Structure formats: C-alpha cells, structure tokens
Amino acid sequence: MTQLIHQYGYLAVLMLVGLESLGTPLPGETALIGAALYAGSTHNLGIAGVILAAVAGAFLGDNAGYLIGHWGGYRLLVRYGRYVRLDQAKVKVARYLFLRRGGLVVFFGRFISILRAYAAFLAGASRMPWPRFLIYNAAGGIVWASSYGIAAYLLGKGMDQLSRPLAIIFGVAGVTVTVVAALVIHRNERRLEALAERALPGPLEGYPGGRPL
C-alpha cells in the first residue's frame, strides 16, 4: 500500500476508494488512512489533496454503483427476483424503506465496510431518488474522508492501530443492525407491504401492468 501511494499519490487514493465504493473488494479506507499517514510523516503529499482524492473517489464510485443498481440491479430483481422469494410486494417494500430511511443508510454506510461497498448499488436497485442519494452520499463521503484523513494525519501511527478496532466495531454494528432490521421487517412484513402499497400504489415499472423499463 505504501509503495502504491508513494508511486501514484493522490491517484492511488482516488482509484482504490472509487473501486471499493463500486463494490470491488479493495482496501479503500486503508488507502485513505495510509495516504494520510504518509502525508503526515513525509509531507510529500498534502492532507487536503488526500481528502479531496478520497471524496472524489467515493463520489465517483458510489454514483457509478448507484447507476448500475438503478439500471441493472432493478432489472435483475424484476426478472429473477421471484426465484429467490423477492416478488413485487417485497421489492415495493424495499423501495418504500429506501424512500423513508435511505438517506441514513447511504450516509452511515460510508463508515461500515460492507455497506460502504454496496449501499449505493442497493439505493439504485431500490430506485432511491438520485438527488436525495446525491446529497446524503456527498455528505457521507466528505465527513468520512475528512474525519479519517485528519485523524490519521494528526495521530500518525496511532491512527493505524486505532483504525482496526474501529473497523471491527463498525463491522459488528453494521451486521447487528442488518440482522435486527431483517427481523423487524420479517415480523412486520404484512404491515410494511400495506404501507408500501399505499405509498406506491399499482404495479411497479417492469412488472405486469406497470410502465415498461
């Protein structure tokens, strides 16, 4: 990682963060912290440039992931969702939940490793309105890159040691929230389906009776 940052500088941060945000299993957050540590210890990079590169990578990767989910992911749900028990009613519930709470998922997903890679795709597949996605995504990317970048720059090696337990804590929290949310949704499935139908009456696009994709 240090060699990549030494050789490619800001571009390495932008590419690794962007590809991770697109759903590729690459260490984007590690690249941000590593580049900030490198900037603080060598001053060959500026911390402002590191943060801007991470924000740009997050923005580009997440928006690409959103578009893939919006066009490709949703089509897959329409065509094959019923084979994995994701019929139109459940897809409508997912869209309803993202309409209501999608902003929080997108914002806080930036700080949780699993969601950081897939929140944008899920938002796109659930047809979360793009302007709303854009606002929460940009806010999450800016806060994430600034907080982790500045902390690593100021704390030096201490941040490298601190980031691992933080990643574990955020990861456990993310899994816990996901499991609890799945249980709550399952127990309130019928009520949520009724609420989703009232909010989104009629067939969804791509389903029989709905607008074509």
Image (tube, rainbow, N blue to C red):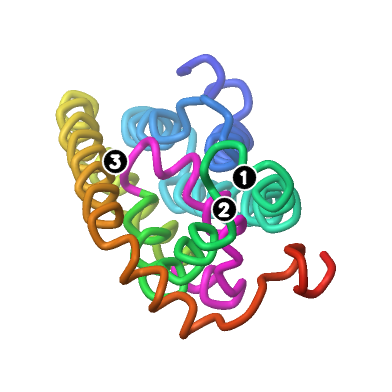
* Residue 47 % position (x, y): 41, 47
Q: Which residue is mark 1?
A: 81
Q: Amino acid at mark 2?
A: Asp
- CB under 8 Å between discs 2 and 1: yes
Marks 2 and 1 sit apart, C-alpha to C-alpha, by 6 Å
Question: For the residues carrying marks 2 and 3, which lies nearer the camera in this image?
Answer: 2
Helix or strand or loop: what does disc 2 sit on?
loop
Q: Which residue is mark 3?
A: 153
Earlier in the chain: of badge 2 and badge 3, it is 2
| Residue 189 picture quarter | bottom left
Residue beneath the point at 49% across and 39% down: 117
Q: Which residue is mark 2?
A: 87
Residue beneath the point at 53% across and 50% down: 58
* Residue 23 % position (x, y): 56, 36
Q: What span is colored magenta in the figure?
A: 111-136
Marks 2 and 3 sit apart, C-alpha to C-alpha, by 48 Å
Indicate whether 103 appears above or below 201: above
Helix or strand or loop: what does disc 1 sit on?
helix
- In-image side of 51 versus 63 (left or right): left
Marks 3 and 1 sit apart, C-alpha to C-alpha, by 46 Å
Instruction: Residue at the far top: name it.
Output: 3
